[in-house]
Image: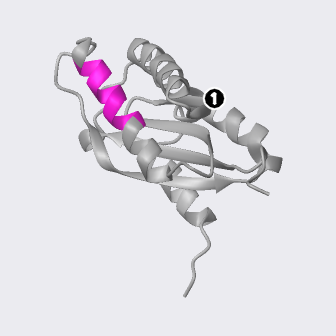
């Protein structure tokens, strides 16, 4: 058997603006997230949802066997920053931080992950990015 049509892993990725500057205003986020999803799909990256706040992005996508988490995130970040800069959506040159975080998501919790990502603006009315990152750190199993 050469493979299965059901071979993939859901990945929840998150990355921040350079210096965690809140550069992504509401209007910029709206056009940026639409661009990320459309551009990704044109490149064979199946984005389930993308959303975020002023200084970071969450993206849930299907990772296929021939794809690499790091390469997909690199492509999403590079092309979206280039698109923002080429179209002069911001008054300054835009960059993402070099680092990112990524977690696998169980198929049984996809709906919850999508809901969480789609409610980022609401979530960040009461929680900071640092509080969100700390909550994710608590979920990671520490191996000693």
Quarter of the rendering occupied by the C terminus: bottom right
Tell whether position 101 is magenta.
no
Q: Which residue is nearer to you in this view: 117 or 44?
A: 44
| Image point (43%, 52%), residue name | 70
Look at the picture and state if 27 lies above or below 118: above
Quarter of the rendering occupied by the N terminus: bottom right
Residue 32, x across and y down, in percent: 42, 20
Q: Which residue is nearer to you in this view: 138 or 38?
A: 38
Secondary structure found at label 1? helix
Look at the picture and state if 45 lies above or below 136: above
| Residue extent of the magenta highlight | 76-85
| Image point (23%, 20%), residue name | 85
Residue 119 appears in the rendering: no
Q: Is residue 120 left or right of residue 4?
A: left
| Image point (47%, 22%), residue name | 39
Report the residue that reaches farthest toward the right: 108
Tell whether position 79 is magenta.
yes
Assign the magenta stretch its main secondary structure.
helix
Report the residue that reaches farthest toward the bottom: 144
Residue 73 appears in the rendering: yes
Location of residue 29 by image quarter: top left
Residue 73, x across and y down, in percent: 43, 43
Look at the picture and state if 3 lies above or below 45: below
| Image point (78%, 37%), residue name | 111
Q: How is the image coloured?
A: one colour
Which residue lies under the disc numbered 1?
Answer: 118
Question: Dot 1, crowdedness within 10 Å: few (<14), some or many (≥20)?
Answer: some
Residue 89, x across and y down, in percent: 28, 13
How many numbered circles are shown? 1
């Amino acid at each position: 058997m050469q493979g299965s049509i059901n071979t993939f892993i859901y990945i929840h990725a998150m990355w921040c603006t350079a210096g965690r500057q809140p550069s992504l205003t509401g209007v910029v986020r709206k056009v940026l997230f639409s661009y990320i999803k459309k551009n990704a799909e044109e490149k064979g990256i199946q984005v389930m949802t993308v959303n975020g706040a002023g200084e970071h992005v969450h993206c849930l996508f299907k990772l296929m066997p021939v794809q690499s988490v790091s390469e997909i995130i690199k492509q999403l970040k590079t092309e979206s920053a280039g698109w923002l800069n080429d179209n002069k959506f911001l008054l300054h040159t835009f960059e993402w931080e070099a680092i990112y975080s990524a977690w696998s998501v169980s198929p049984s919790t996809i709906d919850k992950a999508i809901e969480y990502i789609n409610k980022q603006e609401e979530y960040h009315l009461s929680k900071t990015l640092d509080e969100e990152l700390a909550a994710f750190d608590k979920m990671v199993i520490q191996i000693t």
